Image: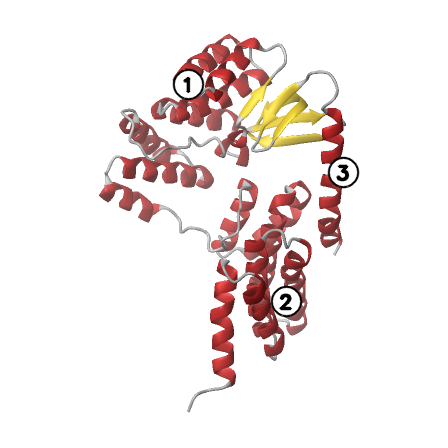
Amino acid sequence: MNNLMTITVRPLLLAALCLAHIAAAHHASADQIDVGLPYPQVTVTDAHDGLVAFTFQSGQKSTALAGEVRRVRITGWDSLNLAEDLLSQNKPADAADQFRKTFTQTPPGWRKRLAAYRLISAQAAADLMDRAVAGWLAVVADEGPSPGTLSLCPATSGTPSPTDDQAITILQDAISTTQDPSMVISARRLLVTLLKRQDRIEEAQTQASLAPPQPVVTLNVMITSPTLRKIADLLAQGRPDQAADQLDAQWSSLPASQLPAALIIRGLARMHLADQAADPAARKALLLDAGLDFMTVPADFDDYPAAAAEALYQAGQLNLKLTPPNNPAAQAAFAQAVKLYPDELGGRKSADALAKLKDNQNPKD
């Protein structure tokens, strides 16, 4: 259970790191990166596989998915910084032109890759969807499909663009030729979105029907990590063994914000594996481990109410799977979810489950 031990320690480590980063902010100027949280005093060191690597002045190293980067500033790189300024001033078309110039003028290496990543984001913001899609596909072809490169899939607004039709054609060609399932999923989802905003509803429905079903492990829990999303997809596809193996392999690299969802996914994977286990002792051990996963969430991550509610609901369901079912424990888990998180999806599901359980215990004449 060493993994569970790191869960409780990691938030303390992150807090200590944050204090170190704040203290470092009083030092000389450095690079800047914004990934939803701004980090004004870092050194950007690399860009590869759709990831942007940077180092805090404390020496701590980190990476961000390129698709999650909102702004980056590199000391002395005036061409890129001008493009970033234009983008932050809500001038995405001008920013795209400047990023294109920066990309063209930059020699091969990590800086050119970073310029390509930022160019895609600016083109998408400017609704130059054909160029953004072509640029994204070029990055995936060059660096390979990965959580980082797939995170660069262009974001769309609800407003149709004159470039949508060309982007749709580009995506259709890519889907027909690529062999990578994760790439097909990402491209088809974007294709469906573009078809819908062009009111090509029948075509969108056809493409949506060809897409694999959405993961059953959405759980109303925020899963922003593409790596974790792919693992959840494996579970949804009925491959709990692969999901559990990949989750264990990736555990130490998951951001702290994703640990609540990761615990729920691992607990569900163990529950499914328990269903497949022929040996009663092995089945019981898997269920007990799953229960620990679920109960760690409300115990250590109660500031994630959606995840805590879902984990309590799943803990209740797990107790009903035991032989014999532990109805009092199930009832307690459901009741706790209803009491603490009545407005969360997990709380509402627990209320329904609690009512059913009581009905079964007190059948009506």
Residue at 41% x, 25% y is 125
Using the image, determine if residue 191 lies above or below residue 86.
below
Using the image, determine if residue 351 lies above or below residue 214.
below
Q: Residues within 10 Å of mark 1 (few under 14, many from 20)?
A: some
Tell which circle, 3 or 1, labels the residue nearer the N-terminal end. Answer: 3
Q: Which residue is mark 2?
A: 287
Mark 3 or mark 2: which is in front?
A: 3
Name the amino acid type tagged 3.
Ala
Res. 91 mark: 1
Q: In 3D space, how far apart are the residues under numbered discs 3 and 1 (Cα atoms)?
A: 38 Å
What x and y, as percent, mark residue 119?
Answer: 46, 20
Q: Quadrant of residue 48?
A: top right
Q: In 3D space, how far apart are the residues under numbered discs 1 and 2 (Cα atoms)?
A: 54 Å
Q: Is residue 45 left or right of residue 357?
A: right
Res. 16 mark: 3
Q: Residues within 10 Å of mark 2 (few under 14, many from 20)?
A: many
